[in-house]
Image (tube, grey):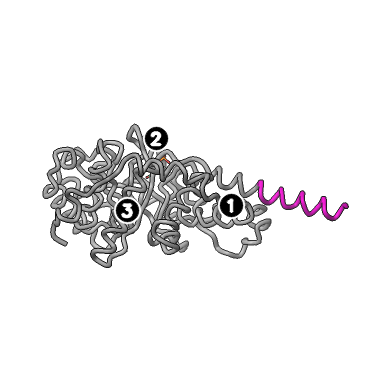
């Protein structure tokens, strides 16, 4: 749609209320122990399993893809009774030159390859080269493109320039899904985060994403909540459902629980599915797997105690 500043200009964002709401999330409504394993298994379905490092190699990407296909060790999946579920992560996310390796390694799995593009992570490249990079990654087989925005457009509140840029990126993606990374750690205020979220959605983003993982501050719950409220307001105004991807710095299973609770409470059960929610994370799966292993061994220990008594 065309730029419509009335959807975000003057919109109040109450920083302390947002922070309070985010801070109480863990304690106010924790997931019952009994259901934790199910929530953690669901989190795996939502992960964009990521490697975005300067020393990435084809071999590392192939190992990552093997993990994406079978995210849990057999003994854990069997212990949880989900060995036949065909559990995979949501997508594998890599740099453009790694896309062909990921496409090959994931063939037949149904797992999409996401590529960062547009001069990730800073995006400070001429626009025509950034658009060309999107087209190149799509031609290599990327089904999803994670673009970065020009932060200066936000800092100068030049919403038209931001909208124009993202619209051109959307067009360059063709049939590929586009996730717009706002790099919220660079945007200075929650008001800017809200406005940039709205502009990205108006310009055709399929997902809005918090961070590249390279900013000083990446996915935080207060910023996430601000973006989620923008998603809700945009949906109410237009009837369109846009996805959300917190990304960067998330390493612990308990974070996977907190984000899922937030999504369910704010937007509803549909935002716990991979078409509307992803975690961008390179190292959260390990802790989820560890917690699920404790769950399995704990259950065995409990049934053993029961049998012995
Ligand atoms: O998009 C995903 C992020 O770059 C991953 O960041 P991370 O390595 O801090 O998990």
Q: Do labels 2 and 1 touch, CB within 8 Å?
A: no
Q: Residues within 10 Å of mark 1 (few under 14, many from 20)?
A: many
Q: Nearer the viewer, residue 81 or 104?
A: 81
Figure disc tally = 3
Considering only order in the chain, which callout, 1 or 3, is on the residue closer to the N terminus? 1
The quadrant of the picture showing ligand 1 is top left
In the image, the residue with mark 1 has its CB under 8 Å from the nearest atom of ligand 1: no
Considering only order in the chain, which callout, 2 or 3, is on the residue closer to the N terminus? 2
Return the x and y of residue 208 as percentages of the image width and height: 30, 52
Which region of the structure is painted magenta?
294-309
Q: Is residue 49 left or right of residue 13?
A: right
Q: Main secondary structure of the magenta part?
A: helix
Residue 38 placement: quadrant? bottom right
Q: Which residue is mark 3?
A: 229
In the image, the residue with mark 2 has its CB under 8 Å from the nearest atom of ligand 1: no
Q: Do labels 3 and 2 touch, CB within 8 Å?
A: no
Q: From the viewer's perspective, is residue 188 above or below residue 198?
A: above
Q: Residue 55: which numbered mark, if any? A: 2
Element class at badge 1: loop
Element class at badge 3: helix
Q: Which residue is mark 1?
A: 72
């Amino acid at each position: 749609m065309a730029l419509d500043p009335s959807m975000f200009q003057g919109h109040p964002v109450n920083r302390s209320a947002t922070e309070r709401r985010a801070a109480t999330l863990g304690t106010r409504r924790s997931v019952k122990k009994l259901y934790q394993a199910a929530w953690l298994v669901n989190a795996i379905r939502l992960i964009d399993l990521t490697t975005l490092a300067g020393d990435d190699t084809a071999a590392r990407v192939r190992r990552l893809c093997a993990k994406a296909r079978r995210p849990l060790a057999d003994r854990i999946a069997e212990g949880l009774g989900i060995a036949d579920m065909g559990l995979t992560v949501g997508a594998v996310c890599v740099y453009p030159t790694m896309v062909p390796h990921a496409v090959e390694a994931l063939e037949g799995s149904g797992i999409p390859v996401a590529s960062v593009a547009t001069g990730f992570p800073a995006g400070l490249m001429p626009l025509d080269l950034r658009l060309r990079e999107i087209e190149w990654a799509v031609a290599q087989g990327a089904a999803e493109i994670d673009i970065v925005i020009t932060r200066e457009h936000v800092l100068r509140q030049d919403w038209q320039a931001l909208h124009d840029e993202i619209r051109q990126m959307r067009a360059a993606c063709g049939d590929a899904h586009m996730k717009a990374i706002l790099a919220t750690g660079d945007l200075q205020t929650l008001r800017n985060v809200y406005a940039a979220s709205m502009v990205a959605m108006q310009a055709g983003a399929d997902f809005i994403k918090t961070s590249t993982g390279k900013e000083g501050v990446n996915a935080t719950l207060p910023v996430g909540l601000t973006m989620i409220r923008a998603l809700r307001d945009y949906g109410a105004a237009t009837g369109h459902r846009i996805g959300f991807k917190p990304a960067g710095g998330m390493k612990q299973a308990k974070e996977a629980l907190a984000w899922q609770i937030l999504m369910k409470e704010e937007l509803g059960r549909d935002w716990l599915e991979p078409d509307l929610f992803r975690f961008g994370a390179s190292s959260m799966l390990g802790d989820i797997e560890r917690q699920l292993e404790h769950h399995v061994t704990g259950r065995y220990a409990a049934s053993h105690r029961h049998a012995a008594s």
